Image: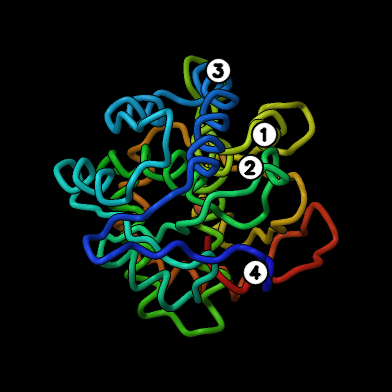
Amino acid sequence: MPKDTSYAAKRPDASGFIHYSEDENAVWRDLMQAQLPALRAHMARPYLSGLQALELPQNRVPQCAEVSRVLMDLTGWRVEPVPALIPFDRFYAMLAERTFPAASFIRRREHFDYIEEPDIFHELLGHTPLLVHPEFAAFSEAIGKAGLKAARNDYARLIRLYWFTIEFGLMREDGGLKGLGSGLASSVAELENALSERPQRRPFDVLEILRSSYRIDIPQPLYYVIADLDELFEAADRDLLADVATARALGDLPPLYPPKTARTTAA
Ligand SMILES: [Fe+2]
C-alpha cells in the first residue's frame, strides 16, 4: 500500500449518496465489461453466486448503501465508504463490527488495468460478493475481533490471514483451480498470474499463512488454496491470537522473493 495517493475520498452527501461523474460511471461500466468474461470463466462458484445475489449495476458505480441492504439481509454486513488508506486499528475495528471499509473513489483511465491501492471497483466487485456467504462473513469478523485484541506489532502478521484468503485466495473446484479472492476478481492480470504455472500454491493452513510474508507491489509468487468454505468457518473458531503468537515464535517461512516493502495499512 503506497503511503501517498493522488486520489481523494468521495464523501457521501447528507442523504448518504455518493456522487460520481459521468466519466467515473463510464470507467465502472468499462471495467465491468472488461472483467466479466474472465470472472465467469475463472472465478469459483461462491464468488459468482455472490455476484449474482448482489446484482451490481453495470453502467454506474454502485452505492455502498444499496449493496449494504443486500448484505444486511444475508449476513448482517454493511459497506461503509472510507478514504483509500486507513490504519490497521480502524480496519480491524470495522471488521469486528461487520462493517466493510470501502475506498470510495474510482480509478482514472490511466490506471484502468492496474492500480496498487484499492478503489471502489476492487472493493465492491472484489469483496462484497464474498460477504454474501456466512463463511466469509464469520471469518472476516473473526479477523477483526482478533485484531482488536492484538498487539500493534502483530497487526501486520494477522493481516496475512486476510491477504492470502479474502484478497488472494484460490479454490479447488471440480478438480481444477479457480480464483476466489477480491484481488483476483478485480484484476485480470492477477487472476491470470494466480492460475498460471508461475506461482507456488499451497493448501490453506492458518499457521503457514501467518508465517508467510508478502509484497503488494509484485505479481504474487505464492497462493493458498481453499478446498471447502467450511475451512473458513473452522478458522473463524480458532484462537487466532494464539496462532499469531505461535507463528511469531516459529518465525517466517523463507520468502519466495526478496522482501522490500512493509504493509502499513489494510486494504
Ligand atoms: Fe481488498
Establish whether ligand 1 lies closer than 8 Å to the Cβ of label 1.
no
Q: What distance separates the C-alpha of mark 2 from that of mark 1?
A: 7 Å
Q: Residues within 10 Å of mark 1 (few under 14, many from 20)?
A: many
- Pointer 2: what residue? 223
- Tell me if 5 is positioned left or right of 149 in this view: right
Looking at numbered disc 3 in the image, what kind of residue is underneath it? Pro
- Pointer 4: what residue? 263
Task: Point out the frontmost of discs 4 and 3.
Answer: 3
Q: What distance separates the C-alpha of mark 1 from that of mark 4?
A: 21 Å
Q: What distance separates the C-alpha of mark 2 from that of mark 4?
A: 18 Å
Residue lying farthest right?
Answer: 258
- Pointer 1: what residue? 194
Q: Residue at x 62, y 57 (%)?
A: 117
- Tell me if 138 is positioned left or right of 172 in this view: left
Q: Position of residue 82 (x, y in %)?
A: 42, 66
- Tell me if 135 is positioned left or right of 182 in this view: left
Q: Classify mark 3: helix, strand or loop.
A: helix
Residues 246 and 237: in front is 237
Q: Residues within 10 Å of mark 4 (few under 14, many from 20)?
A: some
Q: Position of residue 26 (x, y in %)?
A: 53, 35
Residues 261 and 100: in front is 100
- Pointer 3: what residue? 37
Q: Residue at x 39, y 70 (%)?
A: 92
Name which of mark 2 and mark 1 comes first in the sequence.
Answer: 1
Q: What distance separates the C-alpha of mark 3 from that of mark 2?
A: 22 Å
Name which of mark 3 and mark 2 comes first in the sequence.
Answer: 3
Looking at numbered disc 1 in the image, what kind of residue is underneath it? Ala
Quadrant hosting residue 239: bottom left
Q: What distance separates the C-alpha of mark 4 from that of mark 3?
A: 31 Å
Looking at numbered disc 4 in the image, what kind of residue is underneath it? Arg
